[in-house]
Image: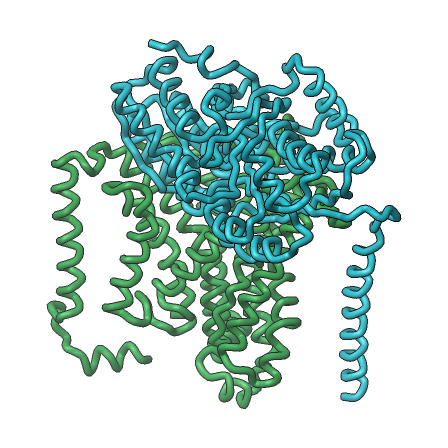
Amino acid sequence: MATTERVATGPRSPFNGKNLAWVGALAAVALLLTLGIRHGTCPSSGSIWLSYFIYGLRSGAIYAMVALGYTMVYGVLQLLNFAHSEVFMIGTFAAVYTIKKLFGVQTNHPPTGLTLMFVLLVTIIFAAAASGLTAVVMERVAYRPLRRRGASRLAYLITAIGVSLVLSNLFLLLDGGKHLGIPWSWPAIGGPGAVNYPPTISQDKWFSIGGVPVSPVTVLVMAVAVVMLIVLDQFVRRTRTGQGIRAVAEDPETASLMGVNVDQIVVATFLVGGLMAGVAAGLFGITFGAAQYSIGFYPGLKAFTAAVLGGIGNVRGAMLGGLLLGLIEQFGIACTAAQWQNVIAFVVLVAVLMFRPTGILGEQVGG
Amino acid sequence: MHRKRKLRVLGAVAILALVAAGCSSNNNNNSSSSKKTVKLAFFGALTGSAAGLVVPGWKAVQLAVDNANAGKYGNLPVKIEAVPEDTQGNPTVIPPLATKVANDPSYVGVIGPNFSGESAAAGPTFDKSGIPFVTGSATNPTLNANNWTHWFRAQANDNTQAPDMANYIAKVLKPNCTFVLSDDSTYGKGLAQIGQSTLTSDGVKVVADLGAVPNGGTGETKDFSPYITKAKQSGCTAMFYGGYSPEAGPLRAQMNQQGLNNMTMVVGDGARDDTFLSSAGAAGNGTVASCPCGDITKSSDPAASTFVSEFSAKYGASAPIAPYGADYWDIAMMYINAFKAGKTTRADITTYFAGLNYQGISKHIQFQSNGELNAADAKIYMWKDVDKQWSYLGLSTDVIPSS
């Protein structure tokens, strides 16, 4: 509704200040690129650009799925759930456990064919379940008591950071504390450091697009991500729970007067965010082959950034933000040194927020 | 409400009881002897991704201390307690741990810190408190410029290591050009900087990307595709990587997945461990690592063989001793010898180390006035990943042709 109002009151001309700024920025980027390629600082080979594009989309798809958890919880509770990165981390452990312990996959005997499909499916489901459960327990143990007491937003934030630190350090000890005399540890899934995934789906070239090797795992990540993002989008738009989530995000008091059970909706929000993070975690673990206490840090940070970029609280915004951030990160370094990766990504974020303080798609849940 | 409050009180009491139980169990292992107990703190990444580099050293220290307390090295005037201080390989974790040890007079010495970044972060605290601190694996050369009077490095530094890596590339691999990549750690970036300048003076064309991989040593970076595309862009057939195994291993694996099989990777001691082997997998084959650490199992010194057999007996035959088990064993023995000579205070031990002339199992140890190992004792060894094992190539001077 807000959109129509804005259009009605704002200037109708496509050449208003904001649009001109966007066009100007794009033109500047295009000019710099042309100069860069001429000068030899930017790659002139199409296959290098394509490589940045494909890997950018792959990491962007993961960011997008994780970003949904941040954005939905923010939409409903105005809480920046920094512990969401640990929801993701637990998903990577659940996935490696499933592959190693439940299926007993050995390093030298990766499953093939239908068995492989089954292993991947169950692994991703288990990872999603573990992450979803973690998110729900987190809400019940850490956030609901605060909500009952009407705690300030700052208290939520500190709690979130605390939960995040506690969980990651707990996993650090479980994972690698044996030689420090810590009595409990993971039953033999690895030594200190990262727990490596046994090989499942092939990481080697399946086919190539314009000279860039594409592996089955890359295809898997993209395919699952697309399906999950569409399913989630439809869930938020079309189901009763989805409506409830949007209603609570809009105005929790009115929603509860209308008969929406806010507690249930909050749990559902955490659950859905956790499930998505778990799917992302399973894919991430299978792609990069490791589960580790600190594994959630970067995907978490990037997903949070993606959520802000797309418009925090906005489901489609998080998806768009994730994909964009993945691409920006890769393309940003094409003409510079790789150490500028994060600088460029965050400069773009700041620049976008200067023109659109609420992110690309604005703040509404459900877009 | 009442019941809830009761439960809460009960919970609090239970937690207190647990804490109390934990504290009291710590006191149980006081020995019955009347000997004074002195503490040695071992600083390193005992948990986390980089632990594979550090745990062998900690195991060696424990072994030496257990032997000493059991009277294997004669009657010591003190009982030694080795205390692990887990830095997680993160320079921001170490300051409070360092302050705790520095301010507690029962600690008379520090073994470590294992990495360069954490050494730089904790050094001022240790040095001010007068506690001797001896590293066997922090190799960044700039550490000696701090003028710490209580700091010793019983190891070659990267002014020897990085040129050897670069010379190996220039004289053995002879690539068309070399892509130099590093993480942002004190160690990794320093190593790559020195390597880059040696490569250039060797006449090798260099495409450099220093400090690119964030939070080196933590293993937090999992997706290396941007760096790999960057490496592809360079078109080089050799890569000099300055950094630790938690990044180097996955990087190597992903390079092959993304079609960069023909780029040979040369890494330093920070990536020469089992973590690299397992995370790089088959893609690691052919990777060359330099290390100030040699192959102790090949030593003809009887003391070294005793160490190897005791280590295997205690920790199992498959427990890796390399990279730095033997080197930290020597440092522990330096402390034990100091105690044997009646030096049991921080000041006395520091003076003892400054005048040390000791034949260890890993090397001969004698320090220069700035705390560095004597140049003649600073040696670099070359290793190669062959079928997921580090295979020993030999002393760098034997492996790399001089011209």
Of residues A267 and A222, which is closer to you in this image?
A267
What is the quadrant of residue A353 in the picture?
Answer: bottom left
Seen from the viewer's position, the closer of residues A186 and A315 is A186
Q: Quadrant of the N terminus of chain A?
A: bottom left
Q: Residue furthest bottom?
A: A257
- Residue found at x 67% / y 32%: B333
Q: Position of residue A73 (x, y in %)?
A: 50, 70
Query: Colour mode?
Result: by chain
Residue at 49% x, 73% y: name it.
A79
Q: Farthest residue toward the right?
A: B32
Q: What is the total number of numbered labels drawn onto the structure image?
A: 0
**In the image, B213: left or right of A180?**
left
- Identified at 13% across, 36% down, the residue is A39
- Chain displayed in cyan: B
Chain A is which colour? green
Pick whichever, B58 or B183, lies toward us: B58
Q: Quadrant of the C terminus of chain A?
A: bottom left
Residue A160 versus residue B312 in the image, above or below:
below
Residue A103 in view of the camera: no
B237 displayed left or right of A85: left
Residue B8, x across and y down, in percent: 76, 79
In terms of depth relative to the viewer, which is nearer, B309 or A229? Answer: B309
Residue B217 percent coordinates (x, y): 50, 42
Residue A69 in view here: yes
Q: Residue at x 46, y 69 (%)?
A: A237
Vertical relation: B61 (above or below) A255: above
State the image coordinates of residue B147 (x, y, percent, origin top left): 43, 43
